[in-house]
Image (cartoon, rainbow, N blue to C red):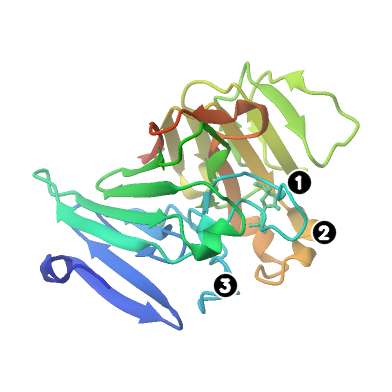
Amino acid sequence: MVDQNAEALSGVHFSVRDGIELIEVENAFAKAVVTTHGACVLSFTPKGQQDLLWVSDQSVYDGSKPVRGGIPVCWPWFGQAVRNGYPAHGFVRNQKWQVEKVSQLSGGQTRISLIVSANEASKQYWPDDFKLQLCIEVGSQLTLSLTTFNESNDPVTITEAFHTYFNIGNPQTLVISGLDGSTHSDKLDDNALPENQEGDVKLLPPRDSVYLQQQGDIVIHDTENSRRIRIKSRNACSAVVWNPGPEIVKGFADIDDAAWKEFACVESGNVIDDFVTIPAGAKHTVSVQYSIESL
Ligand code: TA6
């Protein structure tokens, strides 16, 4: 249940939609909506701007699966499950997280801290004791910090990502810069060997691209919406760029066939060979900051 003090905080409102809890924030900088189901940020709209994020109209809010869109948290593995029957992108995005604290910072930003710990459901997939904390800061930028506390007696190896669905104007003209020098491979191009990424990346033709050892800011040039979206990250070595396009989208029950044009997934974290090993009793934090620049 939510901390009663949090309820009293101005500009923070708790509600339920179908079967999941929503936390609605409005402060001097922006509006945002977060669900405790998967600790997923569903919306972030800075004052005078369009929503940074995209959520499918076909999303399910009954808690049976992650909401399609926003910023799903992929942990403790990214991508296809390690074993048959295990959920893709890990299990925490389909678990109910607890509200640890909601506070207003001296600058007027709103900070929400959500946690999930090892539980009976997680033990079927992941034997180790852990605590996972997501700190979300809503200001003129949106900042997320995901901290893994290894509470087991052994080192633990994870992969992780913020699987962010950005609201975009036109996939034909969208360009992504800042991936130069990383090692690129694409799931849709089975034959291609990993290669050094040179130059900007377009969203089309459809891609499911991983960029390992990526460094520096990533910028999404959303010219149709007269904006750039800047992604600054800390302790994230990987980026992923995904758009299903008009054919692959048909395999997603919770994405309308025409809606592939509305979003670009640009994900930040540590995936595949960029895995992270956390010593027993230690912790690891990966974070991203999203900001919108008008053209
Ligand atoms: O990050 C890209 C990706 O791994 C794609 O291959 C596609 O499967 C997408 O994630 C969505 O995965 P989901 O499990 O959320 O349907």
What residue do we see at 66% from left, 27% from top? 273
Tell whether label 1 touches label 2 (CB within 8 Å). yes
Mark 2 or mark 1, which has the lower sequence index? 1
Disc 3 marks which residue?
Answer: 59
Q: Quadrant of the C terminus?
A: top left
Q: Nearer the viewer, residue 280 or 222?
A: 280
Q: Quadrant of residue 272?
A: top right
In the rendered image, residue 128, in percent from the top left (x then y), is placed at 52, 46
Mark 1 or mark 3, which has the lower sequence index? 3
What residue do we see at 49% from left, 64% from top? 95
Report whether residue 29 is seen.
Answer: yes
**Secondary structure found at label 1:** loop
What residue do we see at 45% from left, 38% from top? 228
Mark 2 Cα-neighbour bin, 10 Å: few <14, some 14–19, many ≥20: few
Tell whether label 2 touches label 3 (CB within 8 Å). no
Mark 3 or mark 2, which has the lower sequence index? 3
Mark 3 Cα-neighbour bin, 10 Å: few <14, some 14–19, many ≥20: some
Q: CA distance from mark 3 to mark 2?
A: 19 Å
| Residue type at numbered disc 3 | Ser
Tell whether label 3 touches label 1 (CB within 8 Å). no
In the rendered image, residue 124, in percent from the top left (x then y), is placed at 61, 59
Is 224 placed above or below 232 here? below
Q: Quadrant of residue 230?
A: top left
Q: As drawn, is 140 to the left or to the right of 131?
A: left
Is 128 placed above or below 94 here? above
Disc 2 marks which residue?
Answer: 247
